[in-house]
Amino acid sequence: MTRRAWMTLAVLVLLAIVPPAFYLSGNAFYLSLATRLVILAIAAVSLNLILGYGGMVSFGHAAFVGLGAYAVGIPAHHALYGGWDALATNSGWLQIPLAVGITALFALLTGLVCLRTKGVYFIMITMAFAQMIYYLIVSIEEYGGDDGLVIDSRTELWLFDLDKPLQLYALCFLSLLVALGLVRMIVNSRFGMVLQGAKGNPERMASLGFNTYAYRLTAYVISGAMCGYAGALLGNFTTFISPEMMDWHRSGELMFMVILGGAATTIGPVLGAVIFIVLEEILSSYTIYWQLPFGLLLIVTVLFVRGGLAGLLGGRK
Amino acid sequence: MKKMMSAALAAAMLGLPAHADVKIGFVTTLTTPAAVIGNDMKNAVDLAMEHLGGMAGSTKLEVIYGDDQFAPEAGKQATDKLVQQDNVDFVAGYIWSHVLLASRKSVLDADKILISANAGPSQMAGQLCDKNFFSTSWQNDQTPMAMGEVLNRQGVKSLYIMAPNYAAGKDMTAGVERTFKGEIKGKDLTKWGADAQLDFSAELAKAKASGAEGIFVFYPGAAGGAFIKQYDQAGLKDTLPLYSVFTVDALSLPKLQAAGFKAVLGSKTTQEWDPTLDNEANKKFVTDFKAKFGTYPSYYAAQSYDAIMLIASAVEKVGGDVSNKDAVRAALKEADFASVRGKFKFGTNNMPIEDFYLREVVEDADGTWTTKVVETVYTDHVDAYAAECKMN
Amino acid sequence: MDTTLLIIQVLNGLQLGLLLFLVASGLTLVFGILDFVNLAHGSLYMLGAFICASLTYALGNFLLAVLVALPLTGLIGWLTERVIARTLYVRDHLDQVLATFGLILVFDTMAHIIWGPQGIAVPLPDWLTGQVSLGGDLLVPTFRLLIIGAGLAAAGGLFWLVNYTRLGMLIRAGASNRTMVGALGIDIQLLFSLVFALGAMLAGLAGMLIAPITEASIGMGNSIIITAFVVIIVGGIGSIKGAFIAALLIGLIDTLGRAFLDDLFSLFMSSAAAENSAPALSAMLIYLIMALVLALKPQGLFPPKVR
């Protein structure tokens, strides 16, 4: 096994063991922290697929997180307060496919437009679509508008009882494993090769007869749907959803996780999420001015740590 | 500190039952411009702790602060941390209704006591009321209801309404519309939160064109100052008199005075408390607060001070044993503490039943801009949602 | 519809549009010439406001404070370019977005530490606090007219600078072909620093102009920067003309949307629902326009001729 493979294994094993151990020894808060972390790691992994491997810098990925969360919250809201009978349920059989489906659809529709643009225009148009969804949700009074939506009951699933913190964590962690496996499988497939080729040299891929637009769009939709699933988990974790989840700052944070950990590496986004969440927690418990060291760290990382932590710790490929 | 140690020592010598310290989590806004409110509340809590000598009877009190960053999600996270990590017994504070609504489940599910020192969303006074939830402020609708009553008494026939678009903004407009008998000429709800709308040019122009006889606004914190200035610059003082709630306060007045916005002098607001209320507790609170922090305390500060005093009274009553929740709840419900409001009692939904005053902005003896009571609008007012509360 | 109200709202939209232009023009220059995405451009808007507010109290005069604060803001821009931006020119846009995102956090927290969280109100001289009659019952706050005047003057000055001076010629040349300007033996580093400082001053000026209306407050740059980006994307990156037209367009749409959309909506929905959804939807309109423009013209309305 390579050094990087060992590192991947070590990070995952630690994530499997440490948070539950904290919980069982009476530190429930650290399990909550880890749950949030693992969910954001899934979102970062999904972003890595298009940003790291596909070269598509999405500055609007938080919209998928938010949409996924509302796909859980809105049915739960109707199940409790009535209205919209077809949607009103707590069943995971409806909520999860809804979260994945609606985000895939959103990715498809926006991707059709976004992928016509390149470079900084792509960054900004993905941000614009995220802002549109943000303001759309804000304008819907029924679902709390700016105030957000409190979910009083979590998704009902087969095997897992999400009201139990350990089981919720187990589901999130297993989902992360599946997401990592899925991305790895995609990247190593013929599809993945074309995607990565289109990042480096789109003209060449096009001249080889590949419709790079279709490949990129497919990757964008897969990424969006995966991120939407992470959003569904996040909604279940926080039991509170607000438009805040889709704020452009959140999209920036997801990007930061990917770059900090190492774009286009398997474990990079996970590592990035770990560092991000843990650091935010530690710094903010010391001072209300925590964003100062945090911002400086961001700048230093971008300036000096090329290839992210995975590159630093695991050696370059 | 010395006082605390000697009290602890005395307790040990007398052989009183030793209880662990009682921890109070206090969630407020410490970053973003809204931190001006949070800092005022924090000052009041620190002053309350100083007045108590850090003790409730023979039990040591400890306050841990959480920052909600003016956002529901961050507020909920801060609350989760206080409940799960710091294992506090009480969670108090909360400026913002939407933050309180988002955080309530975290506290109540853990069977801790939740005390709002400001936010009073209608839901939590009514359908979502809970035996573990208490308030030392008001239900959102009450203060604007009092203002609506004032408008009726002054013979105002029509009104334009402006408020931020969030839970409390909607409650405030609902409140004034409930009591105001004239015509509502128009209403604007503006963007709120960390990137709140602060330029009200479009809305003020609409308000002026509506031909209303007065404008009712609710803009807490920094937005209040911004609104007053633009109102002044637009020259609306004579054509469109200002009737506000939670907008002109001890936080905005020093800034307005520094910038010389005289238009605010004489403007009227309704409130359940005022620095001039004549009772022992209030005199001590206002004097010491001014001596320590150099400004008049705001109502946010007064309510926070009362929240800590309420908790201390209950902890003392149960002898520091906060594990018996029924006893703690009963002790809280008695509200046996010296409130800066002079009197204090809870209604069936654990919201205060209290008086509301009309206050006027004046210059005090030292030339500082502050408020004074003009008249009492409501006596022992019960909020409109109490009947909807089915306490379990 | 009441024409007086309409005229006032158009003026309000114009004021917002001109402020947006001041922020966006610096952004589009830096972007066009330096190929640098500066998310922290909004922080200069905030710093301009804070510095001007402090100086207003120190000097006792708002206009004097503006005159002193302008070069100070330019200096901060200059320093930012020297210390941080310069090392990022060779990087891709992603790195630039992230590093300047970090810079926003740093600037915001610094402002919190220096000036406290509460923000600063800025007093105006008496002759600026009243209203001016523009005929009939058309009363407009004097200071808002001043903003419009100052904005137009700054825009005019910028047009003159870019189109009729040697510096402007270099800027235009730099925007269309960077290497060529360098090959001509021009000190390209100096040019870059100057452009950055100029952008900072323009953004700072916008902050100084809005501070007496709202106030200098932490994070005020974060709400305007995203809109400013929309402006330059719609206008075409690097195009001052594009930024000007797009800024006015977006300023008007936002203001008129806030002013009249709820009346329009209440024609086909309950007035309560209209009041709630109208402000959010008028905010959404801006992004909708941007997506539409990009879908039809992926390089914006006035794309630079050579890239």
Image (cartoon, rainbow, N blue to C red):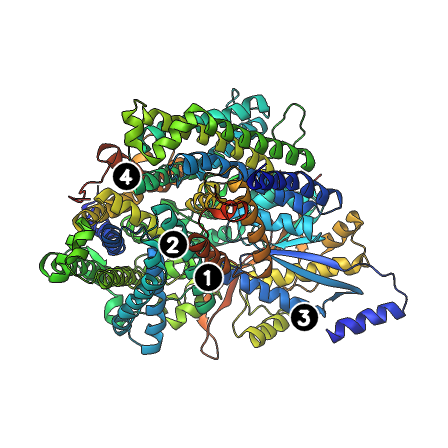
Q: Nearer the viewer, mark 3 or mark 4?
A: 4
Bin the neighbour count of mark 2 within 10 Å (Cα to Cα): few under 14, some 14-19, many 20 and up.
many
The residue at which mark 2 appears reads as C100
Q: In what element is the residue under mark 1? A: helix
Q: Residue at x 27, y 66 (%)?
A: C129
Instruction: Kindly indicate whether the residue at mark 4 contacts the one at mark 3 (C-beta within 8 angstroms).
Output: no
Identified by mark 1, the residue type is Thr
x, y (%) of residue A295? 46, 56
| Residue that label 1 marks | C109
Q: Label 3 neighbourhood size at 10 Å, few (<14), some (14-19), many (20+)?
A: few
State how far apart marks 1 and 4 are (Cα).
31 Å
Q: Toward the viewer: A91 or C179?
A: C179
Which residue extends farthest left? C164
Give the numbered dot on residue B50: 3
Q: Chain of mark 1?
A: C
Asked if labels 4 and 2 touch by Cβ distance under 8 angstroms, the answer is: no
Q: Position of residue B344 (x, y in %)?
A: 66, 58
A54 with respect to A81 (left or right): left
Q: Amino acid at mark 3?
A: Glu
Q: Amino acid at mark 2?
A: Thr
Mark 3 and mark 4: Cα distance apart in space = 56 Å
